[in-house]
Amino acid sequence: MKIPNLIIYTGPGKGKTTAALGLALKYAVRGKKVKIIQYLKGSTYSGELYSSRLYYPHLEIYQFGYGCPWSSMIKSGFLKCRSCGECFRRNRDPKEGYAQTAWTFTKEIITNSHTQLLVLDEFNHAVRYGFIPQEEIRETFTHIPSPLTVICTGRNAPRDLVDLAGKVMVFEAVKHPYQAGISSRRGIEY
C-alpha cells in the first residue's frame, strides 16, 4: 500500500535534511503550518534552528536528543566540532529514550494537529536502530490525514518504510568537500 503523502529522503549523500528544510520553507512562507521533529539531535548549533525562530513564525522545530555541550561555542564560531562522538553515543543509547519520546510526539501531531507539513529528521536512523516498532509506524502512517504531508529523512531507510511511501528520493554525493578532508563549514554544512 502506497501512502501518497509520505515522502522518504534517504541515501549516503548529503542534503536530505537541507532538501526537507527547503520544502518546509516553501510551506512556511505561504502561511502553512510546519513542524520539524529532529530525532536523535539535541541543542545543536545548526543554522536552521536559529533562523526558523527569527524569520518563520509558521515553522516550529523540536529536538529530541542529547545535545553537544560545546554547541554554543561552535555556534559562535569560537570552536569547531571535535568529533568526540559523545552526542552520537548518547543519542543511540535506548535507555535515554529520546526516539521514543519523539515518536510519541509525532503520533500526537499526526492525529491531533492542523499541521500541513511534518518533517521527521533522522527518523530513518531511529527506525533502523529499532527504537520504533515497524508495526506502529505502519499503523500510524496509514492514518496520515490528507492535508498533512510527512517527510522522513536519514540514511538507510528501512525497506518497509520505502515500500509504504508514495515518493522516495535517494541522495548520493558525486563530489563533496568531506572527501577532500575539508571539515564542516559554518553557514554551509551547519
Image (spheres, rainbow, N blue to C red):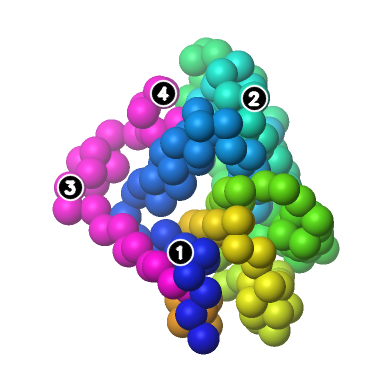
Rendering coords of residue 41 (x, y %): 64, 45
Rendering coords of residue 70 (x, y %): 64, 27
Do callouts 1 and 2 mark residues in contact (Cβ within 8 Å)? no
> Which residue does the numbered mark 2 point to in the structure image?
57
Residue at position x 56%, y 42% from top? 84
Up the image or down, 144 lies above or below 62; here it is below
Up the image or down, 147 lies above or below 188; here it is below
Horizontal side of residue 186 vs 148, given as left or right: left
Magenta segment boundaries in residue numbering: 165-190
Up the image or down, 149 lies above or below 168; here it is above
Residue at position x 60%, y 16% from top? 54
Q: Can residue 126 be spotted in the picture? A: no
> Which residue does the numbered mark 1 point to in the structure image?
8
Amino acid identity at mark 4: Arg
> Which residue does the numbered mark 3 point to in the structure image?
175
Amino acid identity at mark 2: Pro
